[in-house]
Image: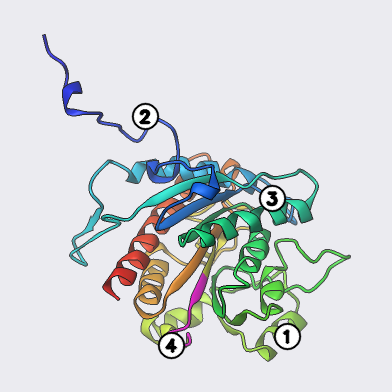
Amino acid sequence: MSTHGYDAGRLDLPFVGICSFAKSPICTDWAQLRADVAVLGAPFDMGTQWRAGARFGPRAIREASTLFAFGHAGAYDHEDDVTYLEGVEMVDMGDADIVHTDTAESHARIERAVRAALAAGALPVLLGGDHSVNIPAVAAFDGHGPVHIVQVDAHLDFVDERHGVRHGHGNPMRRAAERAHVAGLSQFGIRNVSSTAREGYEDARAGGSDILSVRQIRALGTEAVLDRIPAGAACYLTIDIDAFCPSIAPGTGTPSHGGFLYYEVLELLAGLARRNPVVGIDLVEVAPDHDRSGVTAILAAQLLLNVIGRVMHARRAG
């Protein structure tokens, strides 16, 4: 009688099993966390100004990430002739607990979770959530600076205050720039009609921000853009999925046409990983209800796994 291969272990296809990020082991007791990479969900979208739904982003990205978790030893890239993620211990920490209507408490819980990842010596990878979750994530690095923020986004997110709101998804880069442990900002992909007024751009530039649109980056080329990031600076990478063209990433609250394509961003971030230590990552604003095909979440998962792989490969290469 056939055993159908069960004696050789589980096939464990993407649609089978518990949906952790890339089918990584789960550790919700953060005091026991031991990992090279710690993935954390921040399902908070009460900072949005238009279409909500990014609270379901972490679940959607996790589900999409199972597509890239076939159980192989790492992920071989034939163009680079490198097996990325080989031997990398990646753990899914679960989600920071969110208190509905309470931004301050929800952000505080996200900050504590990122601090737990840093205390364990892991690379924190935060799944948003709207872009306001970057505020507590960057705050958690106050004992780990200085850090340079590399933002990939359609919007500058440099609003200071609007009707008393200082911690929404239009504020995170302004809040980051105010922190003593943030050494500077590179803001890439910023374009078209923005949520930040002219004075916000002037304030950002006065503080040393380097702001480039998609068209400017295409004209400069990847290497020239990378040359503008301070050499050797420890970088915190924040990726808003609306940086991409909505033709490939429609599942977001504030889509903006004229965005990046996949390889433009991957090549930029792969180059960053080669040149600079990347100490933290967040990817935000995936709102799956606005994309029934699921391609936005797949894009997010694919980009994250490729970037994590390159960051860890660069660390091991010294």
Q: Mark 3 points at which residue?
A: 45
Q: Where is residue 150 in the image (x, y as percent from the top left)?
A: 53, 75
Question: Label 3, label 4: how many angstroms apart (C-alpha)?
Answer: 34 Å
Q: Name the residue under label 1.
A: 203
Q: Is residue 71 visible?
A: yes
Number of numbered discs on residues: 4
Depth check: 247 or 19 in front?
Answer: 19
Name the amino acid, label 3: Asp
Q: In this view, does 162 lie above or below 221?
A: above
Name the amino acid, label 2: Val
**Image quarter in which the N terminus is found:** top left
Q: What stretch is highlighted in magenta?
A: 229-236
Question: Label 2, label 4: how many angstroms apart (C-alpha)?
Answer: 44 Å
Specify which label sits upstream in the sequence, 1 or 3: 3
Q: Name the residue under label 2.
A: 16
When asked about the image quadrant of residue 178, the answer is bottom right
Q: Mark 4 points at which residue?
A: 231
Specify which label sits upstream in the sequence, 1 or 2: 2
Question: Label 1, label 3: how many angstroms apart (C-alpha)?
Answer: 26 Å
When asked about the image quadrant of residue 305, the answer is bottom left
Q: In this view, does 102 lie above or below 179?
A: above
Q: How crowded is mark 3: few (under 14 residues within 10 Å), some or many (20 or more)?
A: many
Question: Label 3, label 2: how many angstroms apart (C-alpha)?
Answer: 29 Å
Give yes or no for residue 57 being in the magenta stretch.
no
The residue mark sitting in front, 3 or 4, is 4
When asked about the image quadrant of residue 76, the answer is bottom left
The residue mark sitting in front, 1 or 2, is 2
Name the amino acid, label 4: Ala
Does 117 sit left or right of 49 as displayed? Answer: left
Which residue extends farthest top? 1
Give yes or no for residue 231 being in the magenta stretch.
yes
